[in-house]
Every structure is written in C-alpha cells, then in structure tokens.
C-alpha cells in the first residue's frame, strides 16, 4: 500500500450534501464531491489488511484495495482500469449502492470504514473527465445473435459483456428509454438521468442495439405508466432472429396492503408516484399525474423507496410527510446479532429524511378512512415484536390505536415476484412458488432457447446484485456458445 499507516493519520470524511434550503427546491443531485486531494487522502485509509473482506461482501467482487492504492498515488487511469475489470457501471453503483463493502471493511471493525462508494464514484467521474472512457467496440465479431429483453441494470450489464465478447446484442425495452429501475424508480436527486444516457450512448457506439418502446409478449414490465404507444413484439419474432434470448425483465409486482378502505382514491404504489415524477422531469407524457402538493402525505414502508418518496413529496410541496414502518426502530450501532463483517441492520438516515418529515416505528395500518371516495385519514395501532419458536411475532399494543391525516398514501413495501404473464406464457416458461422465472443449470429456463437473469429469477434485490447477475449470465452464455 502507498501509505500503510494512512488509516492512523486520516479520519473518515464523507462528501456531504448541498444545503437543505437549496436542494429542496430542485431535483439536482444532492450529494457533493470532495476535491481530488481530499479523495486521495480518503483512499489512503485503505489499510494493508491482508484479507479484504470488502471484496468478499461486494456482489461484483470489486478489488477495492488495489484500485484505491492507485487512487492514493494519483494514478486515476490505473484506478479506473482496475475498477472496470469487475464493475461495468461504477457511475451507477457509486451513486446508489448501499455499499455492502463498507460494512465489511476491516478498518470498520473497530473504526469508521473507508469511503469506498464515494471513492469509486470519484474514480469513474475522473476517468470520464480525463477522456479515458471511450467506445471500445470488439475487434472481431463472432457468430451469435443475442436478444436481451429488459433494459434495466441486469440487462445492461449482460449486454455490455456479451457485446465485449463480440456477440451481436439487441436490447428490447418496453419503456421509452432504457434504464429500468435506474431511470424510472430512483429519483433524479440521487441519480441524474444524464449519466444513464451517457453510458447507453457509449454502449451504442460499441455496437449494442437498443430497441425501446417495444414490449415483448405484451409484457407489463414498465414502471407504472408504461406508454400505451409501445410496439408489441411476439416471442415468435425473437425466435426467428436470435440464437438465444435472455430475459432481464425484473420483479415488478408490488406488495399491497389489504386493509379496509384500500379501494379509496389517493392510495397509490410508490413506484407509480416516483415514476411519474421522473417522467415529468424527462418531458415524457404521463397518463395521470400524482402530486403531493399541499397534501398530508403518509409513506408506508421504511426502506430506501420510502425515503425516496419522502424526498419527492417534500420537493412537490407536501403540507406534511410521515413515514411509518411496521418493524421496530433499528439500533444506531451494529448489534451483536450481526457482527462484523456481516451486513448490520442499523438505523439509516438518508438525505431525504434530513429534509423534513416524521418517522414512526412499530406502527401497523388498521384501516383507511375517507370522504367522497378519497382517503383522508388512516387508523393505525402500535405493535410489539417478540420471538416465539424462532420466529418474530407481531402483537398489537392494547389501547394504542390512533389516527393520522392522510390525503395521499404511498405504498413502499417492496416487491413480491415477477408475474409477467405475457412473457412467461409467450415463451412457455415455468415459475417457482414466488412467481419468479425458474432456472435450471445456471441461467437456463424450461425453454432451451431462453435464459433469465437478475430480479426476474431471484426476486427484487439491489442494483449491484442485478449488475452482478447480468454479468454472470453473460459469462455463462459466452461459455456455452
């Protein structure tokens, strides 16, 4: 390592955010960046640990110590070259990854971990700035035409590697632009969509063909308001044109809340709300606007999607925002139940939470109440959790019922399974008990010509895991062909 004692000299310093009073009035990215010298200092904290658990925890198996050493030495080109060996899209993970690596950082076992995610973002953006990231089409094309159905992170990753191997790759995307959850789920204030456009333009220059606004088998894998003007491609059309079809259509069936009054207006799925906002900023026509302006907003679900709803509702001018979670409030520090280097369940306060709103924990929704066909209040109850027979059991706290004003309720409770009947039926595929596409022998489906990767076979997960699965599928396809 360049400075094996750097971690003893330099304290962890995060990039931080733009002032709340400034960022709450726009949708520009909230996270700022340190200077090059400060970033090199942060990279010097990567210690000569011997066994890099960060590498073990990272789904794409990033080689953090090696490229951070290059960063510390000011070798931006060398750092980028090592970074992209394992991660095709560090500009995405550098912005939205929860940084599983940092939870397993050896320094983090008794100190604050290295700022790996922010260091990664600094490297890739510097690489673009220096003109290092250029189209590199394969020097030789080989036989083999691959259709990738779904342009989200898994599909983009698979297409990237398949094309690098010289195969002919066409990505089919049902929405107007590729990106999937990156484009239509994550708010612009966390991931500006120009960075997606920049990467896709690069892939096109390298030979990947993108066919957008084309739904395969009448699939409904768009986000919320998939354009009605999309073309429909029958599965049979792909059979005749491609040697192999890889499905990366995601898991887009949201969890619902079956409580009395659920049919009232003003109760919507979180990604419908977020998608419409992203589409509005992109100038896309929306089928129906969902706005939080002037409303009492309640977000049900305490995860990242719920936090994104909080930030978006505040920017739209909500009168108030309350986020409720049925689970108890996590501890602020790593609990004994998840020792290092495991991922800890700890309290996470995002930039959106810092912008205003209230968070309630261990609260369950009993019913939705309304007037004139629209929701106006929620009846809730506090709950307690205990372990019985090795399982967590929820019980209501007697006498703890209360009501919340709620003119807009956003359901941010995650996703259950794929349920893409048009695609599954069109290709004659089998699904498992969760509704995800069943695969055999790596990524093969029950149809010998069709493979599946990402959330469509694993269930909803992280962007970085989708990228990793797309790469693994590509490697398996290349080996097979």
Image (cartoon, helix red, strand yellow):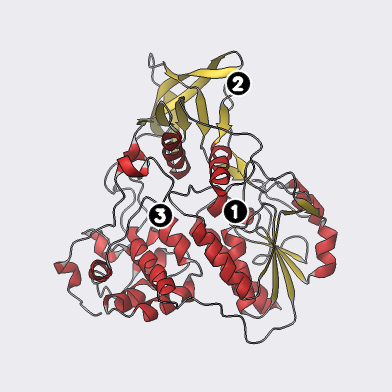
- Which residue is farthest front? 283
Left or right of 319 in this view: 149: right
Q: State the separation of the CA atoms marked 3 and 1.
A: 18 Å
Q: Nearer the viewer, mark 2 or mark 3?
A: 2
Left or right of 119 in this view: 459: right
SS category of the residue bearing label 3: loop
In the image shown, does 50 or 261 lie closer to the viewer? Answer: 261
Q: Position of residue 392 (x, y in %)?
A: 43, 36
Q: Position of residue 220 (x, y in %)?
A: 71, 46
Residue 348: tell me if it is visible: no
SS category of the residue bearing label 2: loop
* Quarter holding residue 343: bottom left
Relative to residue 240, is residue 300 depicted above or below?
Answer: above
Q: Earlier in the sequence, mark 2 or mark 3?
A: 3
Instruction: Kindly identify which numbered label has been placed on residue 180.
Output: 1
Q: Which residue is mark 3?
A: 98
Q: State the separation of the CA atoms marked 2 and 3.
A: 35 Å
Relative to residue 318, is residue 480 depicted above or below?
Answer: below
Residue 289: tell me if it is visible: yes
Query: Who's the residue at 71% across and 83% down the image?
Result: 142
* Quarter holding residue 372: top right
Instruction: Kindly identify which numbered label has been placed on residue 264.
Output: 2
In the image shown, does 379 or 131 lie closer to the viewer? Answer: 131
Query: Who's the residue at 26% across and 71% down the image?
Result: 40
Q: Quadrant of the N terminus?
A: bottom left
Query: Who's the residue at 45% across and 25% down the image?
Result: 294
Q: Position of residue 435 (x, y in %)?
A: 67, 46
Q: Residues within 10 Å of mark 3 (few under 14, many from 20)?
A: some
Q: Earlier in the sequence, mark 1 or mark 2?
A: 1
Q: Determine contact: label 3, label 1, CB under 8 Å.
A: no
């Amino acid at each position: 390592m360049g400075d094996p004692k750097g971690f003893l000299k330099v304290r962890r310093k995060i990039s931080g955010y733009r002032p709340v009073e400034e960022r709450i009035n726009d949708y520009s990215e909230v996270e700022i960046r340190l200077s090059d010298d400060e970033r090199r200092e942060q990279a010097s904290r990567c210690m000569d640990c011997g066994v890099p658990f960060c590498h073990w925890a990272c789904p794409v198996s990033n080689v953090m110590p090696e490229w951070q050493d290059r960063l510390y030495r000011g070798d931006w080109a060398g750092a980028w070259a090592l970074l992209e060996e394992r991660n095709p899209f560090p500009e995405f993970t550098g912005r939205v990854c929860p940084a599983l690596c940092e939870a397993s950082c050896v320094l983090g076992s008794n100190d604050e971990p290295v700022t790996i995610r922010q260091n990664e973002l600094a490297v890739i953006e510097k690489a673009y700035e220096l003109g290092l990231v250029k189209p590199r089409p394969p020097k030789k094309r080989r036989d083999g035409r691959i259709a990738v159905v779904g342009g989200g992170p898994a599909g983009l990753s698979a297409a990237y590697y398949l094309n690098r191997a010289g195969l002919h790759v066409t990505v089919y995307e049902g929405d107007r632009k590729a990106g999937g959850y990156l484009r239509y789920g994550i708010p612009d204030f966390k991931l500006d969509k120009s960075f997606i456009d920049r990467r896709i333009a690069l892939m096109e220059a390298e030979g990947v063909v993108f066919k957008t606004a084309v739904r395969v088998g009448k699939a409904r894998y768009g986000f919320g308001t998939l354009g009605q003007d999309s073309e429909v491609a029958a599965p049979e059309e792909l059979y005749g044109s491609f040697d192999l079809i890889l499905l990366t259509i995601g898991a887009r069936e949201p969890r619902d809340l079956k409580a009395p009054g659920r049919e009232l207006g003003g109760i919507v799925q979180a990604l419908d709300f977020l998608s419409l906002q992203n589409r509005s900023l992109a100038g896309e026509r929306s089928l129906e606007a969902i706005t939080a302006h002037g409303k009492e907003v309640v977000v049900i679900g305490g995860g990242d999607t719920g936090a994104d709803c909080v930030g978006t509702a505040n920017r739209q001018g909500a009168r108030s925002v309350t986020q409720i979670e049925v689970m108890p409030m996590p501890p602020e520090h790593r609990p004994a139940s998840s020792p290092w280097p495991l991922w800890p369940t700890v309290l996470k306060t995002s930039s959106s939470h810092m912008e205003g709103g209230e968070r309630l924990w261990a609260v369950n929704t009993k019913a939705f109440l309304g007037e004139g066909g629209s929701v106006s209040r929620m009846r809730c109850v506090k709950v307690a959790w205990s372990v019985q027979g090795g399982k967590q059991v929820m019980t209501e706290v007697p006498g703890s019922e209360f009501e919340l004003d709620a003119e807009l309720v956003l359901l941010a409770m995650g996703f259950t399974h794929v349920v893409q009947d048009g695609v599954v039926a069109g290709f004659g595929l089998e699904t498992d008990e969760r509704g995800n596409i069943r695969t055999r022998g790596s990524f093969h489906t029950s149809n010998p010509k069709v493979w599946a990767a990402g959330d469509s076979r694993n269930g909803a997960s992280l962007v970085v895991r989708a990228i990793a699965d797309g790469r693994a599928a590509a490697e398996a396809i290349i080996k097979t062909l």
